[in-house]
Image (cartoon, coloured by chain):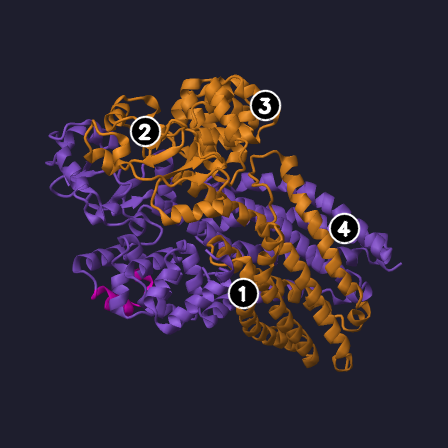
Chain colours: A orange, B purple
Amino acid sequence: MNETQTPPMESGDLSQRIKDAVGAGDAERLAGLLDPLPSSEALRELLMLVPDERDRVLELVPVELAAELVEEAPNEMAVELVERLEPERAAEILEELVSDIQADVIGELDEEDAEAILSEMDEQEAADVRRLSTYADDTAGGLMMSEVFRFTDTQTVGKVLRELAAEDEDFEQYRGQHPCIVDQNNRPVGVVSLRGLLTAKRSELLTSIMVPPLTVPVDMPLEQLEDIFDENPFLSVPVVDADGVLVGVVMRSAFTDALLERSESESLKRQGVVGDELRSMPLWLRSRRRLAWLAANIVLNIIAASVISAYEETLAAVIALAIFLPMVSDMSGCSGNQAVGVTMRELSLGLVRPIDAFRVWVKEVSVGVINGIALGILIGLVAWLWKGNPALGIVIGLALALNTVLAVSIGGVVPLMLKRMGQDPAAASGPLLTTITDMAGFFFVLSLATLMMPWLIS
Amino acid sequence: MNETQTPPMESGDLSQRIKDAVGAGDAERLAGLLDPLPSSEALRELLMLVPDERDRVLELVPVELAAELVEEAPNEMAVELVERLEPERAAEILEELVSDIQADVIGELDEEDAEAILSEMDEQEAADVRRLSTYADDTAGGLMMSEVFRFTDTQTVGKVLRELAAEDEDFEQYRGQHPCIVDQNNRPVGVVSLRGLLTAKRSELLTSIMVPPLTVPVDMPLEQLEDIFDENPFLSVPVVDADGVLVGVVMRSAFTDALLERSESESLKRQGVVGDELRSMPLWLRSRRRLAWLAANIVLNIIAASVISAYEETLAAVIALAIFLPMVSDMSGCSGNQAVGVTMRELSLGLVRPIDAFRVWVKEVSVGVINGIALGILIGLVAWLWKGNPALGIVIGLALALNTVLAVSIGGVVPLMLKRMGQDPAAASGPLLTTITDMAGFFFVLSLATLMMPWLIS
C-alpha cells in the first residue's frame, strides 16, 4: 500500500467525508465510514452534524447501525434522534433494540409521536413497550426487559438445550440470563444454573435441578436493587408483579448503567444543570433550563446581599471591608461544599442515612474548627499585612473562622435534611448552603467590624 | 409471638447491641447481628464504631463475613481496615477475596505492611497479588483478576463439563467467564460459548467449537476498555501481556465498578475534595486534604480581590456597589460552572474531545449571550429599584451580562484545555474558572462604574 497517497485520517477529515456522503445521499459510503468506528465515536460524529443531516444518516444507514447509534446515545439524546424520524423508520430502528431501551425512548416521547411509532411496530412488541413505559425509571419495572428466558415446570433439560441449539436469532437477547421456570400461572418457581444444565441428563425435568428463585417486585427502587445485586452474584433477577406473576427480568448491566447515570446526573445537578443537558440539544431548551436554576439562585443572592445593605455605614467607614466580603463568603462556600460532597458520596455508597445527621454534624464540626482556625489565621494575616491594619486582620480572620465552622457543619448535614424532607439533595444542597454561608459571612464581617469600629478607623 | 416483648429494632438500638457484643467479645452474638444485614448496612454499622472496636469486629467474626465487609468497603476504607489488623488475620481475610480486590488493597498499603501480610498468604496467591498490584489502577492490568477459566487446546468438551461437575469450591470465581483456550505457550487461541458447550459432543476437541478470542493488552486504559465492552456483549475479556501470554481476565463487573468509582471520585473533586474522603477516616487526614485545596483557593481569591482594591475610590464614592460585587461574581461563577458540568459530562460520555474546544465554545457563547441578557436585565432592574438609581442598574446589569458571556464560554472550554495539558479537569476547572470570573466580574462592575461616575452620583 502506498502510504503517501492515503489521505490523513484525522477526525476533522473524517467528519468532512461523512458530511459529504450525507450530502450526496450515498448510503453505502456512509455506512462504510461509520460502521468501522466504535459506537461512541460514530455517535460523536453523528452529533457533530446539524439535525437535518443526523436525520438523513439514520434514514440512510442499515437499520442495525442506526439502532446501535440510538442505543449508544444517552436516553434524552436517543429520544431527540428518534422523534424527528418518520414513524415507520423509527419503529424499524426500535424493533432492533431490547424492550427496556425501547420503553425508555417511547416513554420520553410526546404521546402522539409515541403512538405513531407504536402503531408501526409488531403488535406484541408494542404492547410490551406500552406496559414497560408505565413504570417509574429507577424501579425494577423501569429497568427490566420483557424478554425472559422462560420455561414451564413440565419441560426438560433437553428442551433448553434444543432451544439453545436452534440458532434462534433472538438468542442473543437472553445472554446472561439463566433459564427461569414458571408454573401454569406464569409464577416463577425456580431457576436453573449453568452447571445444573451442563451436568444433568437431557431427559431430566427442569424442576428436579432448579433452585428456588430470588425475585423482586416490580416497584422495587434502585437503592434496594443495589442490595440485591451486591449480595448476590446473579447476572439477572426476575421481576414479578403484585400477584407474583413473572413480568420481566432486570439485567445486572441495566442496573449498573442506571447507577452510573444517576451518579452523572447528580454530579450535573450539583453544578446547577437540571435535566441531563447535552450540547446537541436545542439552544432554547438548554438556555431555559439553565436560566430556571440561575433565576432561583439570583433571588437567594439578593437575600444574602441584603445583609450588606443593612451595614452600608460600616462599609462606608472602612471601605477595605468590601475587598474581603466576597473572599470570606466564597471561602466558606467552598469549605461547606466539601462537606456536601463527602455527604453526597456517603449517601450514594449507602454509608450514611438521614438518621445519622447528628453523627455527621459532630464529625464535621471537628474539621470545621481545625480548618476554620487555619484559614482564619491565614486570611487575617493577609488582611493585616495588605492594609496595614491589625484590627482589620482580626475582624476578617475571626469572621472567616466562625463562618467556616458554620459552613462545614451545615454543609455535612444539609443533604441529609433535604433527603429526609423528600427533596433532591443533589440539586438543592449547593444553593441552600451558599445562601446561608453568604448571609452569615457578610453578617460576621460587618457586625464584628461595627463592634470594633474604634480600633478599625484609628 | 408476643410483640410487646420484642425490643424495637431501630438502627440506634442495633448499633448499641453491636457495641455491646464487641465489648463482651461475644463472637457468636456479633456474627448473629451482622450476618443477616445486607453488606452495605453491615459496613455502615462497622463504620459507626471507633477504630479499636472495628478491629475487634474483624477479628471476631467468621472470616467470610470479615471478607464481605472488606469487599463492600470503598478501596481507601478497605485499606484502613486491613492495615490495622494482625498480618495473619489480614492474610486470612484477603485470601477469601478474588485477586483483583486483593491487589487493590495490597497495592495501597505501606510496603512493610504489605510484605507482612503477603508472607502469611499462600505463596502462589501472594505472587499473583504482587504481580497484579504493579499495574496502574485504571488499566486492564489494574482491573483484571488472575483467576481464569482456562483450558488447553488439547482438551475436550468433556473436560470442561467434568470440571464444572466437580463441585470445586473455586468454581464461583469463574462465574461469567467463558472457557478460554490457550496453546502450550499460554497464549489465548479461542473462547468457547455457552451454546457451543451445551450443543457439542463430550468427545469433541475444544478447538473445534471455539471462536477466535478478543484480547486486550495489559496496559489498555479504562477509556479504551469502554469501547471494547460497549461494542461487545461479553461478560469478561482476556488480558495478554506484551508477548501475547494470558495474564488475567477483566470482568465486566470490575469494569463498570471502575467507571462508577471514577464518576464518584470526579464528582467529589469538583467540590474540592481530593482523595476520596470518607468520614471514617482520621480527622487530621480529612482536615489536611481539604485544607490543601482551600489554601490554594485562598491564593486565587486574593488575586481576584486585588481587583477590588484597585478601585477603592470608586467604591467609596458609590458604596452600594459593594452590595452587588459578590452577587455578580457568584452568579457568573454559577453560570460558568453549569458549562463546566456539561463539558465534564460530555467528556465522560466520550461525546467531546479536547480537539472540539472551538465547537464547544461557539455552542456556549450562544447560551451565554441569551442568559447574560436575561440575567443582566433582571439584576439591573433589581439594582435600579432597590437603590433608586437607574445608572446603578445599567452598570450592574451590563457587568453581569458581559461576565455571564465570558463565564459560560470559558467554562465550557476550560475542562478541555486542562485535559489537553494533561491536568485533571475535575479538580482544577472550578477554581480556575471562579478566579477568572471573579476578577472579570469585579473589573466589569468597577470599571463601568468609574466610567459612569457622573450619572451614578448625580
Asked whether disc 4 touches disc 1, contact meaning CB atoms under 8 Å apart, the reply is: no
Q: Chain of mark 3?
A: A
Furthest-right residue in this view: B458
What residue sits 43% from the left and 21% below the top? A63
Q: In the rendered structure, which amino acid carries the disc numbered 1?
A: Val
Give me the disc on residue B379. Answer: 4
Q: Nearer the viewer, mark 3 or mark 4?
A: 3
Q: Which residue is mark 1?
A: A360
What residue sits 50% from the left and 59% below the top? A352
Distance from the alpha carbon under mark 4 to that under mark 1? 37 Å
Distance from the alpha carbon under mark 4 to that under mark 2? 70 Å
Distance from the alpha carbon under mark 1 to that under mark 2? 52 Å
Distance from the alpha carbon under mark 3 to that under mark 4? 40 Å
User: Are the residues under marks 4 and 2 on the same chain?
Assistant: no
Give me the disc on residue A153. Answer: 2
Q: Which segment is the magenta one?
A: B106-120
Under tag 2, what secondary structure? loop
Q: In the rendered structure, which amino acid carries the disc numbered 3?
A: Asp
Q: In the rendered structure, which amino acid carries the disc numbered 4?
A: Ile
Count residues near mark 4 (Cα–Cα under 10 Å), then give few for <14, some for 14-19, many for 20+. many
Q: In the rendered structure, which amino acid carries the disc numbered 2?
A: Asp
Under tag 3, what secondary structure? helix
Q: Is residue B326 visible?
A: yes
Q: Nearer the viewer, mark 1 or mark 2?
A: 2
